[in-house]
Amino acid sequence: MKRWLWIIGMMALVVAGAFWAMKPQPVEVTAAVVGRAPLRVTVEEEGKTRLRDRFVVSSPLAGYVRRMKWKEGDMVRAGDVAAVLEPLRAQVLDVRTREQGEARLKAAEAALQVAQARLSTMEQQARAAQAEAGYWAQQLKREEPLTKSGDIPQERLAKTRSEATRTEAARRAAESAVETARAEIEQARAEVASARTALLEPSVGQQRGAGGELVTVRWPVSGRVLKLVKESEGVVGPGEALIELGNTRALEVEVEVLSVDAVKMAPGTAVELVRWGGEKPLEGRVRVVEPSGFTKISALGVEEQRVRVIADITSPEQEWQRLGHGYRVEAVFILWRGEQVLQVPASALFRTGEQWNVYVIDGGVAKKRAVTLGHRNGLAAEVVSGVKEGERVIPHPDESVVEGKAVVVKE
């Protein structure tokens, strides 16, 4: 009897162990409570500051600029002298250039002689034309009263009047020719003087631009010197940049965002500038979303269509006065925000076809629940329907969590 009791006991233990082994064990999971909290939908991109108005002071003509006394960061006032230009300095002549200059001088002297001879001829012709015009003018005065008395026929008076008009026109033409010849002489003399000057060996005075007229370039606006394009003295051409100037208190932020994000933005969209080096974020507003985009290669080698977005800094100036042109910032564009939004963690969501779902812990069992979502960001999602405040959902559910599966929450 004892033997059978021992066998029956052992068999009961085996059956109980098998039953316990075959019984489904609860899965350990973490839980998140569905609750209400502030929610923001944002786009975060790297940007940089830039001056709203930037000016480039350039040379108005070709010349020799003196060394700048300004340093980058100096404050300047509108109307003050920015740079001084001297006339171009003489060049040292080589044999070829000297021969060309001597030939040019000879040609200029010959042209001067021709112009002087032409002037002499024009003056003689002008004196003859003046004398002839005076004669016919006096003749017209004598014949007019005689024609009225009938002593001279009308045909003779008409011929005399015609001659007087012709000779007067010839006189004016001759005087104009004389003025033209005089101008040609002055031009020829200038050519001779220029050719002679070019043949002179550069003297110390010429090298220093002595005796030449100085040209001063003045600041167009008040601001701060950003960059000295031409710090040392030297030759500059017309329109060549000398100094870059700007107002560092008028900063804006330039951010390149993806085109799919740019369509969600508009002038007035709120911006937070973070990780710029200050103690707290700065506030801003979008001013311009540029209408045209461009292609940019990302760090991973992917082509992206991006759009430039310009934002103004609205925080008080004393909070960002340490910022300068070209400084790096992180721009967080706030596309939507809510204060008391019913939400679940984004990690608790999974899809079945087109339907979003979550696993809700109900009585120690995982229950699949379909939900309707509203606004979402990378961390949380707004729940319109499907779960209630206070319920617990399972973040990061794996394949071991299924409908009706017993679960236990990790402490």
Image (tube, helix red, strand yellow):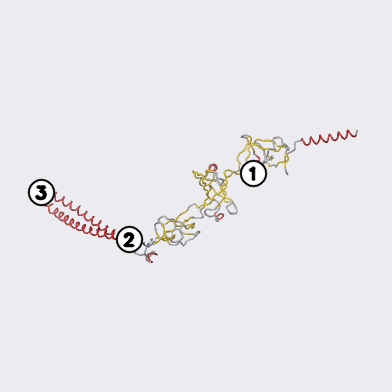
Cα gap from disc 2 to disc 1, whole angstroms: 90 Å
Looking at the rendered structure, the secondary structure element under dot 2 is helix
Furthest-right residue in view?
1
Answer with the quarter of the image where residue 82 lies.
Answer: bottom left
Looking at the rendered structure, the secondary structure element under dot 3 is loop
Point out the tag, 3 or 2, that comes first from the N-terminus: 2
Q: Amino acid at mark 1?
A: Ala
Compared across the picture, whether 236 is left or right of 186 comes to right
Q: How many marks?
A: 3
- Look at the image and tell me in which quarter the N terminus lies: top right
Give the labeled residue for mark 2.
99
Please name whichever residue, 261 or 154, is drawn nearer the observer in this view of the structure: 261
Cα gap from disc 3 to disc 2, whole angstroms: 71 Å
Give the labeled residue for mark 1.
37
Compared across the picture, whether 169 is left or right of 317 comes to left
Please name whichever residue, 51 or 227, is drawn nearer the observer in this view of the structure: 227
Compared across the picture, whether 178 is left or right of 341 comes to left
Residue 197 location, x and y as percent? 33, 63
Give the labeled residue for mark 3.
153
Residue 157 location, x and y as percent? 13, 50
Looking at the rendered structure, the secondary structure element under dot 1 is strand
